[in-house]
Amino acid sequence: MAPPAACYPHAGAAEPAGPADLRSKQMNHTRRLMTYVTTSMLMAGSHTGVLAADAPNAAVSTQDSSRSSQNRKTDPKVQQAANDIYEWLKDTPKDQARTSDEIAKNFPALEPGQLKDALSLLSMGRLKTTGNGTKADPLRYFGARSSSEG
């Protein structure tokens, strides 16, 4: 991608002659290059929703949310919810698998975050899932082996 013309306002200007002029030319080139790089980073950041200056904060935020998610998964309420959901779904065959919305209706006392964390724990081995996780084909959870599974 070619740099925008606005970054090079002196394009086509006469070349400086002499060491001081050469240093000046190099500094101008560096300044223009840095302007181009900064502009590119800001434009790229606006598409991703994170400005380059916010990138370190975004990384910290991701780490914090990961830690808090781990803390929630070890929460006794989440553990109990996972056990209760497992008991409810353990004999459910694949063709009768339940969506998270159906599970939420059966466990109305669970907060959405607790339900999500409990299902995440169960997805690591105790329950099986089917579906693509899209609106048209949501994830569905089941426990029993279907007749097609060995």
Image (cartoon, rainbow, N blue to C red):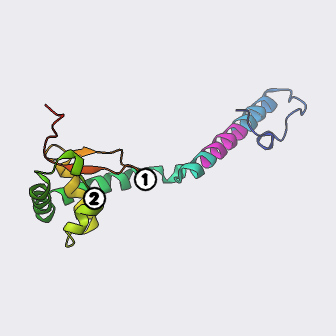
Identify which residue, 43 or 148, lies in the foreground.
148
For disc 2, the neighbor class at 10 Å (few under 14, some 14 to 19, many from 20) is some
Q: Which circle, 2 or 1, is nearer the viewer?
A: 2
Identify which residue is drawn at 36% across, 48% down. 133
Q: Secondary structure at mark 2?
A: helix
The residue stretch that appears in magenta: 31-42
**Where does the image place residue 96, in percent across and percent down from the top left?**
22, 51
**Where does the image place residue 91, in percent across and percent down from the top left?**
10, 51
Q: Is residue 33 one of those drawn in magenta?
A: yes
| Furthest residue toward bottom | 109
Q: Quadrant of the C terminus?
A: top left
Q: Secondary structure at mark 1?
A: helix
Identity of the amino acid at label 2? Ser
Mark 2 = which residue?
Answer: 100
For disc 1, the neighbor class at 10 Å (few under 14, some 14 to 19, many from 20) is some
Mark 1 = which residue?
Answer: 58
Identify which residue is drawn at 13% across, 45% down. 144
Identify which residue is drawn at 19% across, 49% down. 142
Identify which residue, 11 or 81, lies in the foreground.
81
| Furthest residue toward top | 18
> Which image quarter: residue 113?
bottom left
**Is 120 situated above or below 34?**
below
Identify which residue, 50 or 113, lies in the foreground.
113
Q: Is residue 77 left or right of residue 120?
A: left
Identity of the amino acid at label 1? Ala
**Where does the image place residue 67, in percent across and percent down from the top left?**
25, 54
In 3D space, how far apart are the residues under numbered discs 2 and 1 (Cα atoms)? 29 Å
> Which image quarter: residue 77?
bottom left
Q: Is residue 24 left or right of residue 37?
A: right
Type of secondary structure dominating the magenta stretch:
helix
| Mark 2 or 1, nearer chain start | 1
